[in-house]
Image: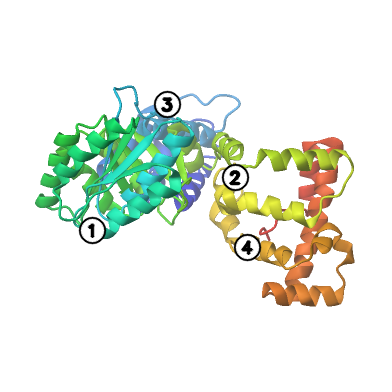
Amino acid sequence: MFENLTGRLSDAAKRLSGKGRLTESNIKDTLREVRLALLEADVALPVVKSFIERIREQAVGEEVLKSLTPGQALVKIIHTELVTLLGDANTPLDLRSKPPVVILLAGLQGAGKTTTAAKLAKRLIEKDKKRVMMVSVDVHRPAAIKQLKVLAGEVGALHCDSEASEKPTAIVDRALDEAKRSHADVLLVDTAGRLHIDGEMMQEVVAVHERAAPHETLFIVDSMAGQDAVNAARAFGESLPLTGVILTKADGDAKGGVALSVREITGKPIRFLGVGEKTDALEAFHPDRMASRILGMGDVLTLVEEIEDKVNKDKATKLANKMKKGRGFDLSDLKDQLEQMQEMGGLSAMLDKLPIPGNMNPAALKDNIDQKQIRRQIAIICAMTPGERRFPKTINGSRKKRIAAGSGLQVQDVNRLLKQHTQMERMMKKMARGGMKKMLRGMQSGGMPPGMR
């Protein structure tokens, strides 16, 4: 998300390089480029107009600090306005109410309400230590009811059964009663959606809302839906007292316009981003971090938090102790690193959160990432014997042929993996002896992670 917008905004800022001051004349063309970039990203027209006007008011006549170029000054202004547009600060869920605290999820069919319910339940259980019950009132889609029951089991949540023959309001009454008797802290209500907005659906969700009296009413919106999502946000915002928004499929090819429009349209904060299919792929939304990501400044804080949450600390400690004792970085260690990288969404997801230098194109960098490479590398290691993983130098020509056949790949792929392992082993040794600076020098000399060409 935002790849094209990031590149266009960076190009617009470069147009002002060499100027000593931001003026009406030299900023006019730049703002035109910013406007076009936002419109191409599917940002709603009213949002674009007000956003551009706020930037113009701040930029024109502002003295450029000695340490800044006009381009940098404009980026600073755009960053500030993006933060304002996206909601100023992270707004966590308000769970301070008599249990069970009811959270109602509303939105169109296909936006990802059911999977988002499971992700949210998992987050509440693991991070907030809450006892969560889930219920579906989507009587129009029996498959959705079954899906929610399966997902509830996967994430460790309680589940209230429902049938397609029941009335949604009756299901809510029973779910509230079961949640109280089960001492649930939170009740998540997954409502029905349609492929488009219609009167019957809105009447039903309003009736369910009245009966459930939720403490939080969250609008679930597909980041890839463009202007349709903006129209849906407006309709739901007029019918329900929304308290927040969750953007789904933010890891896809979305242009980013929905993220920049929905907060302004609904007036409600974006709470979370869905960034993958797994039940742990839900990120808290931080407007300042997202603004930095849009402008190519990265989001290192979120990356650090992901590492804290997803990296196996026992394995990391074991590897660190192993390196300190002078024992080598073998192929089993490499497999662990690759699997943990997969847990974090792969190299592409990590690249989204790293600062991109001004002379580099984020989209071009991603083009150089082979998304399947990590899986291939793991397959090759799995085709090896324990002895080969521990002593890679014993892998001769005949062994390479056997490993290639066992992994369904070519001998060249096995050679490439072994070369990558040698480079990473050198990096690990430098890191053990001299820390991060030596490791970075090792990366500059060719020891890039697997998957980067």
Between the C-alphas of marks 2 and 3, the distance is 29 Å
Instruction: Say which residue appears at 9% left-offset and 50% top-offset.
Output: 199
- Residue 68 locus on image (x, y percent): 57, 29
Mark 2 — residue? 356
Pointer 4 with pointer 2, Cβ within 8 A:
no
Between the C-alphas of marks 2 and 1, the distance is 44 Å
The image quarter containing residue 452 is bottom right
Residue at disc 3, secondary structure: loop
Residue at disc 2, secondary structure: loop
Please state which of residues 390 and 6 is positioned toward the viewer in this rendering: 390
Closer to the chain start, of discs 1 and 3, is: 3
Q: Which mark is residue 205?
A: none
Between the C-alphas of marks 1 and 3, the distance is 58 Å
Which of label 4 and label 1 is nearer to you? 1
**Identity of the amino acid at label 3?**
Gly
Mark 4 — residue? 375
Between the C-alphas of marks 4 and 2, the distance is 26 Å
- Residue 136 locus on image (x, y percent): 26, 48
Could you tell me which quadrant the C terminus lies in? bottom right
Instruction: Say which residue appears at 45% left-offset and 30% top-offset.
Output: 129
Which of label 4 and label 2 is nearer to you? 4
Q: Residues within 10 Å of mark 2 (few under 14, many from 20)?
A: some
